[in-house]
Image (cartoon, helix red, strand yellow):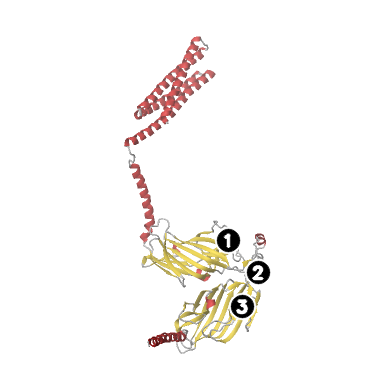
Amino acid sequence: GINAEYGGGLHATMNKPIFFALFLLFFSVCFSLQIYEGLKNTDVTRKIDLNSQLAKHKITLTVTNTGNENTDVIYLALQHEQDQHLALLSVRDEVNALLSVTKDNSVTKEGIVFYKVNLGKALSSGASKTLKIKAVFSGSIVPFPSYITQSERQLVKYKDNVLFYSPYVTEKQTTTLKLASASIQSNTEHKPSVVRGDTITYGPYLKTQAFSSKDFTVHYENNKPFLTFAQLERFVEVSHWGNVAIEDWANIRHDGAKLKGSFSRYEFQINPQANGQSAIKSFVQYLPADASDVYYRDDIGNVTTSHLSLRQRSGKSVWHLELVPRFPLFGGWKTDYYMGYNLPLHHYLFTRADDSSSYLLNVTFGPEIQNSISIEKHIVHIILPEGASNVEVKIPFSIDSQSEYKHYTYLDTVGRPVVRVEKHNTVNEHCVQFFQVTYTFGRLAMLREPFILITSYLAFFGFVMIYLRFELSISKAKSNANITASKLNDQLTKYHEMFKTRIGHHNDLETALEKFLKHKNAATYQDERKAIEGRISRKIQDIQRLVTEIQKLDEGIGAKVTTVEKKLKDRESVQSELHKLIKQNKEAKGSSKTFEDQKVKLTKDLERLDSEIEVLIADLTEDLE
């Protein structure tokens, strides 16, 4: 009884979820494809440009509402494998107005991705509308073979659908392929089709059903360099003091056929066209005409092989920057570089007329490269001034992530607000589009850094002034003694210099006497002697003042200096008496024993005084040390 009761209960509880699951399955099958079936593609013209590494689709689509309801939405469909390579999808109407395109995950069909196009205005029954669709696919053109030698041509393979893949019936359609060259190795034939040079035309095909597919493959020569940015980081730094600084950090790679074997620089230099047909030798980036302070560097330093010139492009002046890597890039090779420039603030930053503290920054999302490029990971950092708030970013296409952080640089206190935007799989069409950043920034906030700078200088000088006026020594007496010793050393140094000058004058007297003894010109001798004695007299006056100051500082050393002065005075007296004796003897034209005795005595007195003075000066020198 117990088993029957529990068994019956288990069976009853299982029936409810099974029924509910079946109901959900039925509901999802019935409503998974919620697409208005009253639309028909009356004419489709597809042009696929395969001239580079990107497959660029330009589709002119005329759609007609054959149903009984109005609709303001049409759907575009891509097979899942093709959607993985989609980099750009845009739709415009007859007046070239850009329409809203969004991926619609609510509409499901196995292996198919749907994009909803908002027409803006409802398409009434019986009405038609022509749309211009642009789609860019990266990574769908693959090198085949994947390895080639330095001198071989690069062959590639492209696979796609001959028919326009659509959830609607298509009355008439044509597909045209534009290849990079007329050298076609092979291509799938779907009648009717025509091959003329580098162009293959499929169709016209009539009355094809929804989701129809006919695959084709074309194998052709394409020596265009497959320039891929593995990662591109753009830094946009706004300074309200006059400029917007742009800096791009790039990791580039050649995604073409990889180099088989070794690289010969010699063969490449002789004939780079034949021995490096698909190599990346250089590429061109266009800069605004008002850009300045352009630089191009790598890990080693400045890359001097680049060239910058002002040229005309599309009717306006632009800077033509030719970026030449340090070595040619063959398939699979990669390198890093960074480049930057400044833009004038008034051309890219604007204020609201009714609110001077509200700003709008308008710059491009990436660099404008002449070649068709593919960017795997594209990051943009917008660095705003310190104190900016209420930051909003408006980008004209979808992004993968957005975050904020703080950046610190010179004189920053709370840091500069930075918005980081990241998008994967971007192409040239994304890079050249402008995006806007709005924020609030008070004018007084501009004075923050000058105020910090001025305050820092004033604080430093104020500290120095206070420090010099503080008595920081442990003993004031010791400090005064140090000051006195320093002054005494200075005075003794001056005295030594004056002493040398005075002795020099004594020597000048000896020289004048020798000239007199040689030339016997008494008048000249008297004049010279008088002049020298005058200089000695003036020097003695200066010395006497100095001796007085020394005595005030140190009486003991002052006494030693006074003794030296007395000895010098005695020496000058003996020297004068000796010179007078020699002069008189010369004028008398004779020599007596008395003269010789007196001369010997005075000479010895002079030598004795010199010896004594020398000892005293040596003692003073020790005091100076």
Residue under the image location 39 percent in, 27 percent down: 542
The disc, 1 or 3, on the residue closer to the chain's N-terminal end is 3
Q: Secondary structure at mark 1?
A: loop
Mark 1 or 3, which is nearer the eye? 3
As drawn, the label of residue 593 is none
Specify the quadrant of the image occupied by residue 382: bottom left
x%, y% of residue 501?
A: 45, 27
Specify the quadrant of the image occupied by residue 206: bottom right
Query: In the rendered image, which quarter contains the C terminus?
Result: top left
As drawn, the label of residue 153 is 2
Q: Is residue 502 visible?
A: yes
Count of labels in the image? 3
Specify the quadrant of the image occupied by residue 252: bottom right
Q: Viewer-proximal residue, 373 or 347?
A: 373
Cα gap from disc 3 to disc 2, whole angstroms: 19 Å
Is 135 located above or below residue 385 in the figure? Answer: below
| 10 Å crowding of disc 3: few (<14), some (14-19), many (20+) | some
Q: According to the image, label 1 marks what residue?
A: 325
Q: Amino acid at mark 2?
A: Arg
Q: According to the image, label 3 marks what residue?
A: 217
**As drawn, which residue projects farthest toward the top?**
593
Cα gap from disc 1 to disc 2, whole angstroms: 22 Å
| 10 Å crowding of disc 2: few (<14), some (14-19), many (20+) | some
Q: Secondary structure at mark 2?
A: loop
Q: Amino acid at mark 1?
A: Pro
Query: In the rendered image, which quarter contains the N terminus?
Result: bottom left
Q: Viewer-proximal residue, 264 or 449?
A: 264
Callouts 1 and 2 close, C-beta under 8 Å? no
Is 574 located above or below residue 354 in the figure? Answer: above
